[in-house]
Amino acid sequence: MVPAKAVEAAPKAAVAQVAKDQLVSKIVTVEETSIIKSGVEKMTKTAETTAEKVTATAKGFFADMQVRAAEAAEKGKKLAMDTVEFQKANFAAIVEAGKIVAKGAQDMGKTNVEFAKANFADMQAAVKEMIAVRTPTDFVKVQTELTKKAFDTAVSQGSKNTEAVVKLASEMFQPISNRIAVTTDLFKKAA
């Protein structure tokens, strides 16, 4: 049997234990709720602050990248346009050189036709002179004069053709030389 004092003490002990458990539970619950709530609020605030900073940084980064991309696209567009214009000018210089060559060749052709006509007329006169000769001494004399005249004419015509070719080459390369000077200036500026 259980003594009476023990029976009386048991409910008091049980009630005390329940009261103690409820009190501990309330203290722990109050403290845990307050700590958790404070922690959650702090974590939420930190997350929001971090999100705002990351968002601001990302917006700044992407805005900067957008500006840089637009600048790069504009520079690329300008470079492409400059390259097209540069190549057009190069092509125009080549076309101009071709025109100069064509005109020079035409002029040289006309000059050579005139030389040929003059040489043909001289040859006709020489044949008439040779036919008119009566003695072998006169024949040698006329032949020597005609040979000297033909040699002088050939040297003269060769010199004129050489001068014309040199002049033509100089004139032909002038537009190309101008483009080379422009290119050299561009490289100097780029360096």
Image (cartoon, rainbow, N blue to C red):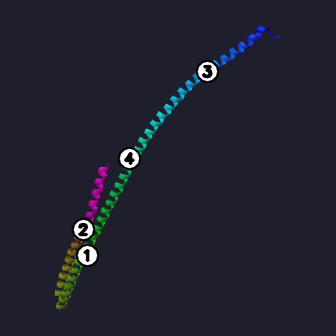
Are circles 2 and 4 on residues that touch, CB within 8 Å?
A: no
**Residue hosting label 4:** 67
Residue marked by disc 1: 106
Q: Rounded to the nearest whole Å, what is the CA distance between mark 2 and mark 4?
A: 56 Å
Point out the frontmost of discs 3 and 1.
3
Query: Where residue 166 is drawn, which disc sits there?
Result: 2
Q: CA distance from mark 2 to mark 1?
A: 15 Å
Q: Name the spot of residue 183 as percent of width and height, x first.
A: 30, 56
Q: Which residues are magenta?
A: 170-191
Task: Determine which quarter of the picture holds residue 127.
Answer: bottom left
Q: Residue type at mark 4?
A: Val
Q: Earlier in the sequence, mark 4 or mark 3?
A: 3
What secondary structure is marked by label 2?
helix
- Determine which residue is flagged by label 3: 26
Question: In the image shown, does 6 or 103 lie closer to the viewer?
Answer: 6
Q: Is residue 142 magenta?
A: no
